[in-house]
Image (cartoon, rainbow, N blue to C red):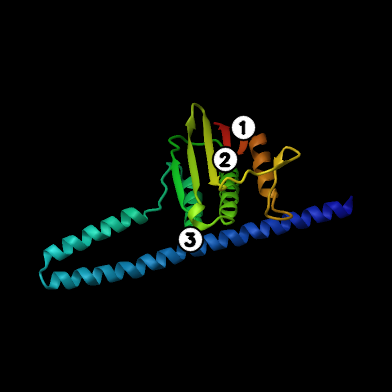
Amino acid sequence: MAILSRKMEESIAAYQRELLDTHYAEVENMYRQMRGWRHDYANHIQTMKAYAAKGDMQAITQYLDLLDTELRSLDTVVKTGNAMTDAILNSKVSLARSKDIPVKVDAHIPVALSVSELDLCAILGNLFDNAIEASLRLPPEQRMIRVYMDMKNTQLYISFTNLTAGRKLKKTDGRFETTKGDGHGFGLVRIDRIVARLDGYISRNSEDGAFTTEILLPQ
């Protein structure tokens, strides 16, 4: 019994270390993007100064139009109305896109949430990590993650979908199997426990070439 308990503690510790490593990777990626934008910003300013020195207003206008188009196409900022959700989703979207995984987010949270920030972070973080891990097993052209969040009456509705290219996941003892190795099922277990503690509802489905997790949390 003590051996099993020790193995469980070691597995949980390994899982927590992996989460920490993932967080560091996400933060580093966001800082790298910020450094890139800072460098590009300086170059754009110098270009427009050169046009201004020549008095070429038409060139400046055209350049600003090009920048506006580029910014619209590259805009990854998610604004849900909830600060913690924005922080989590933007971090994960940045990580996913750095791995060539397209992400579509439609999230709206117009009310204050009763669910704690810790629980929300654990749910969204693990859902996103699972979707990213599954997407990486597919060719880049077949990858896609869709996130939808909104209020349904007095409940927070969360939906995560990742494409599986027609591969239907198998269930063992009522649970979908994970291909991520020993110790990697703790994320799913943690989500289930949080949802149960909050008297919520969770559903997982693998069909039509996609894997979807849906969660309802009372508010």
Q: Earlier in the sequence, mark 2 or mark 1?
A: 1
Disc 3 and disc 1: Cα gap in Å?
A: 33 Å
Q: Closer to the camera, 186 or 161?
A: 161
Q: Earlier in the sequence, mark 3 or mark 2?
A: 3
Q: Amino acid at mark 3?
A: Ser
Q: Earlier in the sequence, mark 3 or mark 1?
A: 3
Q: Amino acid at mark 1?
A: Gly
For label 1, the residue is 200
For label 2, the residue is 212
Q: Closer to the camera, 87 or 158?
A: 158
For label 3, the residue is 98
Q: Residues within 10 Å of mark 1 (few under 14, many from 20)?
A: some
Q: Amino acid at mark 2?
A: Thr
Question: Where's residue 34, x and y in %?
Answer: 41, 64
Question: Where's residue 71, x and y in %?
Answer: 32, 57
Q: Quadrant of the C terminus?
A: top right
SS at mark 3 in the image: helix
